[in-house]
Image (cartoon, helix red, strand yellow):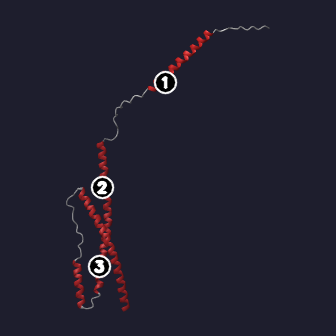
Amino acid sequence: MRVEFAIVELTAAPVADEFRQELSFSSEASLLINSRASRLCRYRPRALAPQPILPSRSIPFSALSAISDGEKSKRIQQTFDEFNESWLVYWNAYIDLQNQLYESLKAARDVTWLGATDSAKMSEINSAQRQLFATMPRRLDYAPLGQINRSMDYALSKVNELLAALFSEKEKCKRLETAIDILTEKANRTKQELQTES
């Protein structure tokens, strides 16, 4: 079998022309891509136009103010209700203590009378006790409410007066406890002396 090969000779001009054509195409494509890229780089986002404010479904300010005032008034009323309850607790404790103080005072007075060994001593004791009972403070009388003062300064001044009175009362209760301890000690001693005499 016989094989024949055909040899084709290319000249330099067509090859060069084809190379220049490919180079020109690639350059144009590169220029086209670079041009698009430069335009993209120069692109700046436009500022967003202000959006219209749509009507809100939130509660109007006047309604919020009314709700706020209503809640505040309800909270204040609840505070006064709780205060009135605590005042009644204090009242009951005060009445019990006051009644007991009167009973203790009366019993102690009766013991002092035991020292009246003669008429002169009895006169001396009676005179001293008369002066003491003259300084006895009166119990608090009921006074009806005549008018309502809604001034905030007035209300705060009354609360401050109460706080000052309670502070003073607590200090005086400490003195009362000390006086009770001393009187109890002296009463026990007097009891022992009387028992030794009997």
Residue 37: which numbered mark, if any? 1
Q: CA distance from mark 3 to mark 2?
A: 41 Å
Depth check, mark 1 against mark 3: the one in front is 1
Please name the amino acid that badge 3 sits on.
Leu
Q: Position of residue 121 (x, y in %)?
A: 25, 89
Which is nearer the N-term, disc 1 or disc 2? 1
Mark 1 in CB contact with mark 2 (< 8 angstroms): no
Relative depth, front residue between 161 and 21: 21
Q: CA distance from mark 1 to mark 3?
A: 107 Å
Q: Is residue 41 visible?
A: yes
Mark 1 in CB contact with mark 3 (< 8 angstroms): no
Quadrant location of residue 76? bottom left
Quadrant location of residue 90? bottom left
Around disc 3, counting alpha carbons within 10 Å, would you say few (fewer than 14), some (14 to 19), or many (20 or more)?
few
Q: Secondary structure at mark 1?
A: helix
Around disc 2, counting alpha carbons within 10 Å, would you say few (fewer than 14), some (14 to 19), or many (20 or more)?
few
